[in-house]
Amino acid sequence: MASYLEIADDSKGHELDLFCVPKHYEEDLDSVIIPNGLIKDRNPSMDISGITSASFNERMHVTFSTAAVLNWAERLARDIVRDMGGHHIVALCVLKGGYKFFADLMDYIKTLNQNSDESVPLTVDFIRLKSYSNDESTNCVKVIGGDELSALAGKNVLIVEDIVETGKTMETLLKLLNECRPKMVKVVSLLVKRTPRSSGYRPDYIGFEVPDKFLVGYALDYNEYFRDLSHICILSEKAKEKYKV
């Protein structure tokens, strides 16, 4: 498994007033846990206290100087091209929460294609999985949209997801895909949540491992709200009641 960033369970995140947060959400968030710049940009001034880097079973603290060269979406793109390069890739975006990460990841792969001696043919498709009611994951997984999955037979498929929590939703999707006999299936998830409810499933590529808290922003939502946040934030308990359906 490629390396990823681990955010400690006791991390309180960053104070909201350090970031540009829409005023209509200021009372709904506890803190910013992953600034947008840590996902996308090389930011030498970023404070990443409480975050460690993990690879296989080894963990080490990320130094401040290391943070200056971290660009995790780009790094994931490089790992994916390294492992799946030389083959036509069908990138399957899991909507709706995955669309921002998907767009950024595809941009980095496109840049690699333009600036490398070898390039990877890439096509995209979209699928929607429904498994949540308010802040609780249900046992019922609905697959909505996308072309016929049978069209993926013999293809190299990259599933792009925003967050893996219990893992049951992804396991259900993988079971459906494998029935169509693709040549290869890899999964990249921006976030993986540490939770006792986990089935033990782990994606092939991970951006961040996060505490068992409800996160919103960067297209992650709570009942369709908060997708317009640039940063990934911890949702307050008060907001869960406010936006509950």
Image (spheres, grey):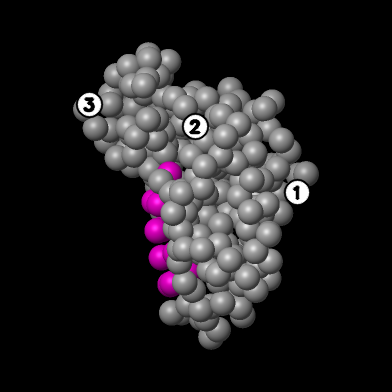
Q: Gap in Å between the C-alphas at discs 3 and 2?
A: 24 Å
Is 93 in the magenta?
A: no
Q: Residue at x 65, y 67 (%)?
A: 182
- Provide residue 77's location: percent of width, then percent of height: 53, 63
Q: Residue at x 34, y 39 (%)?
A: 227
Secondary structure type for disc 3: helix
- Crowd band around label 2 with a 10 angstrom C-alpha radius: few (<14), some (14–19), many (20+): some
Q: Are marks 1 and 2 in contact (CB under 8 Å)?
A: no
How many marks are shown on the rendered structure?
3
Between 165 and 139, the residue placed more toward the observer is 139
Q: Give, as a three-letter code, the residue at label 1.
A: Phe
Is 106 in the magenta?
A: yes
Between 228 and 95, the residue placed more toward the observer is 95
- Crowd band around label 1 with a 10 angstrom C-alpha radius: few (<14), some (14–19), many (20+): few
Secondary structure type for disc 1: loop
Q: Give, as a three-letter code, the residue at label 2.
A: Tyr
Question: Residue placed farthest to the right in the image?
Answer: 57
Residue identifier under label 1? 56
Question: Which mark is on residue 24?
Answer: 3
Q: Gap in Å between the C-alphas at discs 3 and 1?
A: 41 Å
Does 4 appear above or below 102? above
Residue identifier under label 2? 132
**Image quadrant where one finds the C terminus:** top left
Query: Seen in the image, is 169 located left or right of residue 145?
Result: right
Of the two numbered discs 3 and 2 in the rendering, the one whose residue sits closer to the viewer: 2
Question: Residue placed farthest to the left in the image?
Answer: 23
Does 62 appear above or below 184? above
Between 6 and 128, the residue placed more toward the observer is 128
Q: Give, as a three-letter code, the residue at label 3.
A: His
